[in-house]
Amino acid sequence: MDTAAEPVALPFEAPLVELDAQIRGLESRDDAEAFAEQIASLRQNREDMLDTIFAGLAPVDVVKVARHPNRPQTADYINAIFRDFRELHGDRRFGDDPAIITGFGRIGPYKVLVVGHQKGRTTEERIKCHFGCAHPEGYRKALAKMKLAEKFNLPIVTIIDTPGAYPGMGPEERGQAEAIAVSMRDMSRLKTPIVSVVIGEGGSGGALGIAVADRVDMMQYAWYSVISPEGCAAILWKEANEETNAAAANALSLTAKDNLANGIIDRIIEEPRGGAHRDPADAAARLERHLVDRLGEVTRLNPRTLVESRYEKFRRMGSHCTE
C-alpha cells in the first residue's frame, strides 16, 4: 500500500491546509528548535481541528472522502491483509473484467475467497478498470468463484467500492442487469459464510451485486445508496450542481450512520483520524481485525441456518427505516 502518495486536500479541509503550511514553514527554518513549543501547539490545533471537521461532515462531504484519490482500494487491502493471495480470472463465457478482483487468500486463521471492486490508481489503471464500474462478465466471474468457494466450504469476503455498474451499450447487450440479478439471487442461496464491507463507494446494483451477505458493514466515511448524489440530483432537479448534489446526498441517507440506523448494514468500522487515506496502514489493520472477528461469528453457523438467516436479514430491510 502506497503511504507516500501526494496529499490531496478536500474543499472543507482548507483550514487544515493553512495550518500545515504554517507548520512546514516553521520546521524548515534553520532555527526551528527555537519554535518547538509553537510547532507543538500548532500540531495540537491541527489535530483538534481535524477531529472537529470530520465530526461534522455533511453527507455530500462524506461522499468526497469516499472518493478521495488516495483512499485505499481493494487491491491495497488485499496486499496489506491477505496472505498468499492468488488471483483468479475470467467468467468462462466472455472474458475477464479487471473492475472486479477475485482470488483465494488467508486472513487470520481463515482461508477465504476475496471478491472486490477495483477502481485503479493511475489514469491508465482507471480506464482499464472502468473506474470501478464492473461489466456483466465481472459479476459472472465473481459468482463463479463464489460457487467454487462454496464447493470447498470456504467463507467469502466481498469488498465494495463502486459508483455503480457500467452503463455502456456493450455491457447492456451482454446482460448487465441479468448478471447482477442472478448474482444476487445465487448469493442468497450459497451455503457458505459471506461477509461484505463497503470501503468507499457503494452505488446501486453495482454494489449490491456482490453484497448479499450474512454480515454487511461499512467503513466510517464510505457511502452506500440506491444512486449517487449526482444521479439523484439530475433526476429530481434536472441538474447536478453543488446545491442539488448536497440536497440529494441529504435525502438519500447514504452515510454509514444512516445505513446503520435504517438497518441496511450491521456495523461501522471506525477509520483513522481524518479518514483512511491519512493512514492506510492503520485503516488496513482495523479492517483486518474486523474481518477476522466477523469470520469468527459466521463460520460457527451451520449452512442451513446461514441461508435462512441471510434470507430473513434482507427481507427485514426497510421495515424500520428512520424518516
Image (cartoon, rainbow, N blue to C red):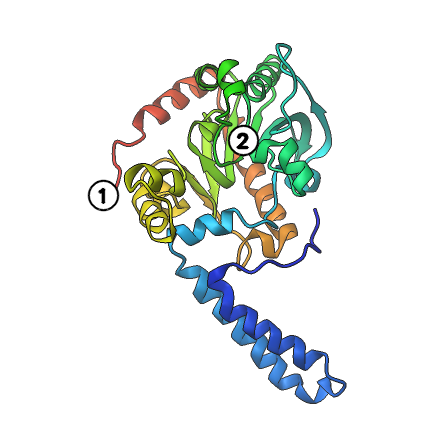
Up the image or down, 12 lies above or below 160; here it is below
Q: Residue at x 59, y 49 (%)?
A: 69
Q: How would you rate the neighbour count of disc 1 (Cα within 10 Å): few for under 14, some for 14-19, many for 20 or more?
A: few
Task: Find residue 117 and report its horizontal and vertical position in percent.
Answer: 57, 32
Task: Find residue 234 and report its horizontal and vertical position in percent.
Answer: 35, 39
What residue is disc 2 on?
A: 133
What type is the residue that disc 1 sits on?
Glu
- Camera-side residue: 147 or 46? 46
> Could you tell me which secondary element the residue under label 2 belongs to?
loop
What residue is disc 1 on?
A: 323
Q: Which mark is residue 140?
A: none
Up the image or down, 198 lies above or below 32; here it is above
State how many labels appear.
2
Q: Alpha carbon of mark 1 to alpha carbon of mark 2: how far? A: 31 Å
Q: Residue at x 29, y 42 (%)?
A: 237
Q: Residue at x 38, y 49 (%)?
A: 241
Task: Find residue 97 and report its horizontal and vertical position in percent.
Answer: 62, 23
Query: Is 143 positioned to the left or the right of 121 in the image?
Result: left
Up the image or down, 106 lies above or below 242; here it is above
- Camera-side residue: 198 or 214? 198
- Camera-side residue: 107 or 15? 15
